[in-house]
Image (spheres, grey):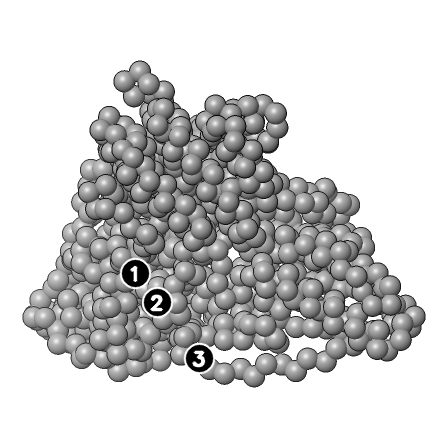
Amino acid sequence: MSTFVAAAPRVPSPRWPVPEERRTVTVLFADIVGSTALVDRLDPEDVRAVQRAYFDTVAGVLRRWHGVVEKYIGDAVMALFGARESDGFDAYRAVRAGLEIQRELDRRPLPGGATLRVRVGVATGEAVVDLGAARDGGHGAASGAVITTAARLQEYAPPGAVVCCAATHRATAGTVTYRRLTPVTVAGRVPPVGVWHAVGPAGPAAVRHDAPLVGRRRELAGARDRILRAVRDRSPRWVSVVGPAGSGRSRLLHDLVRSLDAVDGTPVRWCVASCPPYPDEPLAPVAQLLRALAGSGAPGAGWAGTLAGLLPPARLATALPALERLLDVPDGQATAGAAWCQELLLRVAARGPVVVAVDDLDRAAPAVDRFLHSLFVAAAARGLPLAVVTLHRPDRADVLPVAAQRHHRVPLRPLTPVQTGRLLRHLLIRAEQPLRLVTRLLPLVGGHPGHAAAYVGALADGDDRTLPPLPEALRRAVGAELDRLDGPHRAVLMAAAVLPPGFTADEVARVLDWPAERLPPALAALVAAGLLVPHPAGGHALASPALRRVAADRLPRRFRATFGQRAVDVVLSHRLRRLDPVGGPAAAPARPARRHVPPVHPVAAVPAPAAVVPGPRDAPPGAPAVRQAAPPPRVRSLDAMPFNGRYPAAGSGTPGIDRSAPGRWHGAGPAPEPPGPIAAGRGTHPPARGTGRDPASSGTARDAPAGDAVRAPTGAAQPPVRPTVALDPSDTGPAVEPAAAAA
């Protein structure tokens, strides 16, 4: 079959100030098996009808699972998942779409008695995506090796099967059942590529919480007290545990269930559910609550006997079919079963305390919100000992708010460095990893328990201990946080990622080349969303090192170079205003003139010790030696990139810029000596003394050694003072160091 589809015109959109991004996407390739023989056997009109039925079926399934049809190539279909925005489950949705394509084509009758068998290949990897073209028919929206991999996997798939690469298998572990196939040799790829055959969706797996709860004693006690008050006063309460992804919401719920099993000797019935990423099963959390209430995983004679004690026989005969329908297929048509589930919960609460808890309410369908609100209002009207506990992000608005006196929020803030260190030690001991990694992981975690567990889990799976990469699961979760923003707010975060912590609205505006009045509302919205936090020295900082890294990695090279050059100008201007090596405060222009600054190589540089050389030939006898500028920096690592946003958060024990005092060292250990003294006509200015904090220490500060001031020889010409851009291990961003010009 042949299909010709014209490329959709690319129209610039103001929604995407950064029109292209480097993203982790999942690509699905589907192709018909034996299409040539099928075309030769059928009449042209039947071929046309089969073709339409095939494309309509595939496109409908892809839209249902939020995929974007990038192009049609003959009778093959290529689709993208996570091209413009991601929920962290792109690979899962792609695999489920592939399985449903096979099932729908088997069910659909085709003209001429034709039977279609389709091969599907699914691959996950990095690609450059044109956000404006990432829509149905947006030909050429993505570029990268992952597209070729998906096409090759489709060629090796058995007819009627869905095969996936190793990255897709890792991203869907626990949610999809697989059977491993023999690795295949792909042209141009060494070694052979691992291949997995997707069998079907897996049931929700139980989440293990082995590590102790650290730093959440106050939050746990607050939530527990609200539930106790609801039970004892027979006045329902709604408790919202609020925190970003990785803040430990599920871990807190686990300990809350364990610590509150009875109130005044009366057992508490807990009904816990989570909202999975199933767009075709919006009432799945309600079905989980029903199973927890009945104490059985599937309907049967024993299950009906449990319900017989709650409903009279006449009503049970009506309720039982609706409840079984809800358990079998919890889609939008199972509203009758949801209503009966609500009635059962109220009847159980009339006999004893009941707590209904729903995790990941951000992914809930509107039907779940309506169910919880209706349940809460009915319990309040009847005066029942019932509490509702929901867990979600800080920026989620209450769709159906309840009375303020009955609603209580429990915010989860980042852990302190001491608490994070304790948690890391527990996780490393359990994973049989060396404890010395605490110092290395502490600045990467940023006080988020989920990030700590992800890093330690990646190390246990064999990741590099010297320079731990960002775990794939953490990258997906943080990327989903970023993708909940629109284009302008996403661009603000990307620009902020190339600036040191403590950036201001004016500095971000200069990097983006936007009007200054446009930034304060955007920064306020990001603070409200929990993605920006106030910096101790003033300004703002990104909420976590992982968010900074993901936001910076989204920038293509050309945008990274442009933003990096502007960031150099911003920091130069800032430092010149704060430090004038000759006299009083320097009057820097509002927007310094653009200079040609070559792109900084994406490595962190460590300057070698300064060499001491004799003074000038015309210096008098006994003149002191003059420190010579350090030789070119040597490469330390490929992970810390000065202008791609990989700046550690302030106060995390990692080198960074301190805006409160010029030249202050915030690294671990003593500060390095500066590259040279400051010589000026008004005297010498020794470098400022600073403090450093070792994340592995008890938190005491150590003064960095001050450099020796060296005066120019008497009678010698005073060299002018000029600012130079220096790579300093105490700065993870562009720095300004006053240095004397060479004589």
Identify residue type, mark 1: Leu
Q: Are marks 1 and 2 in contact (CB under 8 Å)?
A: yes
Q: Is residue 586 left or right of residue 371?
A: left
Look at the image and tell me in which quarter the C terminus lies: bottom left
Residue 13's disc number? 3
Identify residue type, mark 3: Ser
Which residue position is annotated with label 2?
489
Which residue position is annotated with label 1?
526
From this viewpoint, which residue is outermost toward the right?
Answer: 41
Q: Looking at the rendering, which quadrant does residue 680 occupy?
A: bottom left
SS type, badge 1: helix
Image point (59%, 64%), residue name? 63
Q: Is residue 334 above or below residue 513?
A: above
Callout 2: 10 Å neighbours few (<14), some, many (20+)? many
Residue 575 drawn at (x, y percent): 20, 67
**Is any atom of residue 698 visible in this view?**
no
Q: State the separation of the CA atoms marked 1 and 2.
A: 8 Å
Image point (27%, 33%), residue name? 383
Comes first in the chain, label 1 or label 2:
2
Q: Is residue 334 above or below residue 357?
A: below
Q: Are marks 2 and 3 in contact (CB under 8 Å)?
A: no
Residue 12 drawn at (x, y percent): 46, 82
Identify residue type, mark 2: His
Closest to the observer, 244 or 18: 244
Residue 246's disc number? none
Q: Is residue 551 left or right of residue 521?
A: right
